Image (cartoon, rainbow, N blue to C red):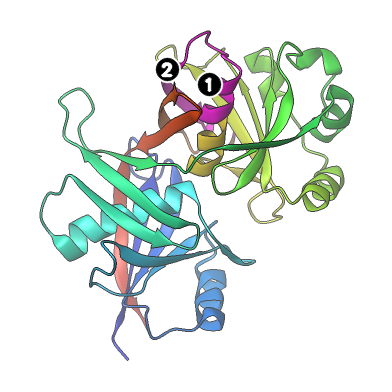
Amino acid sequence: MQTLLYYIVDVFAEQKYAGNQLAVIRNAGSLNAEQMQSITREMNFAETTFILSDTVRDNGYDVRIFTPEAEVPFAGHPTLGTAFIIQREIIKNPVDSLSLNLNVGKIPVRFSNAEKDPDILWMRQIQPEFDLTLSPEQIAPILNLDIAAIDQKYCIQKVSTGLPFFIVPLKTLSAIQSCRINHNLLVQLLKGTATEGILVFCPETADKSADLHVRVFVDCCSFPEDPATGSANGCLAGYLIKYRYFEREKIKLRVEQGLEIDRPSLLLLDAEQSGDMINISVGGKVVMVGRGELL
């Protein structure tokens, strides 16, 4: 069996030890699902990805994504973090784009060399699907908020671009900061609706250069709140376009997340309506933290 190389990266991070950490395992084609799951639990990050081969297949690199609990078909920060490792450690030359073959399908990643935003990676999301809606009365107890904190000009809805999240519009930054999750109620909701988590957002931000402030809560005792979630923010982008939150059919936004858990993150959203399609890209920086060999 080939030596298993691993890399640790911070995704959606402006600097090391910010953003969302990810473990990437290389040369993993000889591992079965049980072995990948065991390694993921040992790594104990929110997700760990496995690059099955350094060789391109079907114009992409075969990759599998695991959480400590299970394999998932798609996740945002693992997609960008893995593409960063493939470009830097496997291709070893600048590229404009590459694709990952994930369980959800082929996900293209674009590398930006623009002067304004150097070293930004962008991933194209699949088309958003809009599903179940909830009432403010259903969601407020889970967040330990008064119903008045919810912006009822917009609905609370389950949206998916590969992984489904409930999108909840709040009125103010203080309302988001006041959220205290009732874990038992959260578990009941997510399992009863086959949803990954809850994303709350508002247009009031801590950093004046940002456009939205976001928190994401998930059903995981080890990681009850995510510092940066590309998949959830992709769902948010689709929601913002569908409901014309910014009163336009095209948006370019800077989203701050992770401030409440001291993992400051910055995500970039680029989305627009084109006929019946909503085209969504989620971007951010990736920072190398460490590397080694699995024994």
Residue at horizontal 54 percent and vertical 43 percent from the top: 161
- The local secondary structure at tag 1 comes to helix
State whether residue 60 appears in this view.
yes
The quarter in which the C terminus is drawn is bottom left
Can you give x and y, in whole percent of width and height, for residue 65 in the image?
48, 63
Q: Nearer the viewer, residue 22 or 127?
A: 127
Q: Which residue is mark 1?
A: 241
State whether residue 262 appears in this view.
no
Can you give x and y, in whole percent of width and height, for residue 40 in the image?
52, 70
- Relative to 223, is 51 on the left or the right? left
Residue at horizontal 41 percent and vertical 36 percent from the top: 282
Q: Nearer the viewer, residue 258 or 199?
A: 199
Which numbered disc covers residue 185? none
**Picture quadrant where residue 280 is located:** top left
Residue at mark 2 to residue at mark 1: CA–CA distance: 7 Å
Up-down relation of residue 185 to residue 106 (above or below)? above
Q: Amino acid at mark 1?
A: Ile
- The span picked out in magenta is 237-260
**Picture quadrant where residue 171 is located:** top right
Q: Is residue 256 magenta?
A: yes
Q: Is residue 197 magenta?
A: no
- Relative to 6, is 115 on the left or the right? left
Q: Amino acid at mark 2?
A: Lys
Q: Which residue is mark 2?
A: 250
